[in-house]
Amino acid sequence: GAGVSQTPSNKVTEKGKYVELRCDPISGHTALYWYRQSLGQGPEFLIYFQGTGAADDSGLPNDRFFAVRPEGSVSTLKIQRTERGDSAVYLCASSWGRGNSPLHFGNGTRLTVT
Amino acid sequence: DQQVKQNSPSLSVQEGRISILNCDYTNSMFDYFLWYKKYPAEGPTFLISISSIKDKNEDGRFTVFLNKSAKHLSLHIVPSQPGDSAVYFCAATSAGGTSYGKLTFGQGTILTVHP
């Protein structure tokens, strides 16, 4: 596809469950980012991949959050033992990863923890 | 600790007039600034950026102004159109770091342009 694709678009889960959120970046983009947007706030940085490795994971709130990008393309954000406070829109973005190439965002996954 | 602040939650403007959206930052390490636009149920879309070595950057109807001494930037939209109605996010980064994409966003300003 032409843009960043995120699946599912909506996810409702019960407190304590495990969830996986998927991101398909724009073909050829080497850099991939995960952000989280809570209601009424701007997106907050979670983690950044350059190729297969996590170059910066300083935004992950705690060790319940983990992300992988095993082949340098698709990425999965994994959340264990979900809590109600994890409810937010999770945004994925990709870029060429050089210079000041702008981020291209997907439409996000709206996660609701009940 | 909100390092990027957009103090106006909303702005209402008449079609054809100028829209001015403001943004303040506190981190003096920020040296690259961006504006993103977001429609409901979509991801943010890049609009315009400015490096700290400049004080103005124009792209069509959109102009961004940077006042480094005041740690303030603004986005001007002239003339405003109803299709510009969206949430506008200001974002900043330290370009000297490892990634231009590690952005710190403001809370956003909802712009409504009335026909």
Image: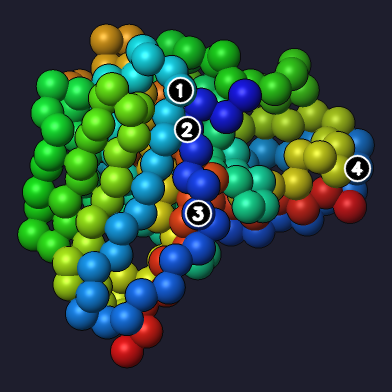
Q: Secondary structure beneath disc 1? A: loop
User: Which kind of residue does numbered mark 3 sit on?
Assistant: Ser
Q: CA distance from mark 2 to mark 1?
A: 7 Å
Q: Residues within 10 Å of mark 2 (few under 14, many from 20)?
A: many
x and y, in percent, of residue B19 in the image: 29, 65
The residue at which mark 2 appears reads as B4
Residue position marked by numbered label 1 in the rendering: B26
Residue B65 image point, x, y percent? 20, 41
Q: Are marks 2 and 1 in contact (CB under 8 Å)?
A: yes
Q: Going 37% across and 15% down the picture, which residue do you hit?
A: B28
Marks 3/2: CA–CA distance? 13 Å
Pointer 3 residue: B8
Q: Which chain is home to disc 1? A: B
Using the image, determine if residue A74 lies above or below residue B83.
above
Binning the other alpha carbons within 10 Å of mark 3 as few (below 14), some (14 to 19) or many (20 upward) gives: some
Look at discs 4 and 3 and give the one toward the viewer.
Answer: 3
